[in-house]
Image: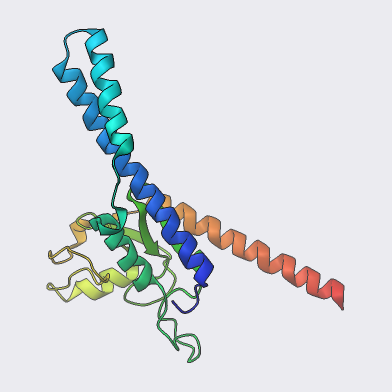
């Protein structure tokens, strides 16, 4: 957990728990709604059954921490954190800050902005259609060019298929997020330089 403060780590975990809980509840309510619709032939009966089933869903305790989705989230969060001593010896083994993680609200997917092979910041993101993990295009193409037996390197990935060029699709949304992040970083750097000059 080096590079990520305890409070930031806890905050990310709590947000993920809430998202997964909401998603699970939404799925249960959706199922209850379909069941109520299919089992009733009058509006009054439907309203009665729906009220009963939706109340049961609201009362249901959702065990988020034992869900596969939460476990995958934790693996991704842990693998995105740099190893102890990585920063001190100057190696970029992973993101140094919490800001270097992106969480997707759909499914609470978390991934690093750093390529899993080169450990450099992703510049040209491609997503593996089979497992959904993201790599830098130049990096992955260089790795798989002469090696047909390369699997996804992301820790905990369940995908057993070898990576092939047809599996990789350009991730336009992530490209925009990366460009936005880069421009924000440049703005922050410029403003801090101006402040430093004003102080002297």
Q: Residue at (71%, 67%) from the top-left corner? A: 190
Tell me: 181 left or right of 18. Answer: right
Residue 87 in the image: state x and y as whole percent.
49, 85
The coloring applied to the image is rainbow
**50 or 139: nearer the viewer:** 50
Whether residue 199 is visible here, answered yes or no, is: yes
**18 or 117: nearer the viewer:** 18
Tell me: 189 left or right of 61. Answer: right
**Residue lying at the far bottom of the rendered structure:** 89
Residue 168 in the image: state x and y as whole percent.
25, 58
Residue 152 in the image: state x and y as whole percent.
22, 68
Residue 59 in the image: state x and y as whole percent.
32, 37
Q: Residue at (20%, 61%) from the top-left corner? A: 165
Indicate the quadrant containing the C terminus: top left, top right, bottom left or bottom right: bottom right
Indicate the quadrant where residue 25 lies: top left
Tell me: 50 left or right of 5. Answer: left
Q: Is residue 164 above or below residue 5?
A: above
Q: Residue at (38%, 71%) from the top-left corner? A: 80
Whether residue 174 is visible here, answered yes or no, is: no
Q: Is residue 21 above or below residue 175?
A: above
Tag count:
0
Q: Residue at (41%, 70%) from the top-left corner? A: 114
Indicate the quadrant where residue 54 lies: top left
Indicate the quadrant containing the N terminus: top left, top right, bottom left or bottom right: bottom left
């Amino acid at each position: 957990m080096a590079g990520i403060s305890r409070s930031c780590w806890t905050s990310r975990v709590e947000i993920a728990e809430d998202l997964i809980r909401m998603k699970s509840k939404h799925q249960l309510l959706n199922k209850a709604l379909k069941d109520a619709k299919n089992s009733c032939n009058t509006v009054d009966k439907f309203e009665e059954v729906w009220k009963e089933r939706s109340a049961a869903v609201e009362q249901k305790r959702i065990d988020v921490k034992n869900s596969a989705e939460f476990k995958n989230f934790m693996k991704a969060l842990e693998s995105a954190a740099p190893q102890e001593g990585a920063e001190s010896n100057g190696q970029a083994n992973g993101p140094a800050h919490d800001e270097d993680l992106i969480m997707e609200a759909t499914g609470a997917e978390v991934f690093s902005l750093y390529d899993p092979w080169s450990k450099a910041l992703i510049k040209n993101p491609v997503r593996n259609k089979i497992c959904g993990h993201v790599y830098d295009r130049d990096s992955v193409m260089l790795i798989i060019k002469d090696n047909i037996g390369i699997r996804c390197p992301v820790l905990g990935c369940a995908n057993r298929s070898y990576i092939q060029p047809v599996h990789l699709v350009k991730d336009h949304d992530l490209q925009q997020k990366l460009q936005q992040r880069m421009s924000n970083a440049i703005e922050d750097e410029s403003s801090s330089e101006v402040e430093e000059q004003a102080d002297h």
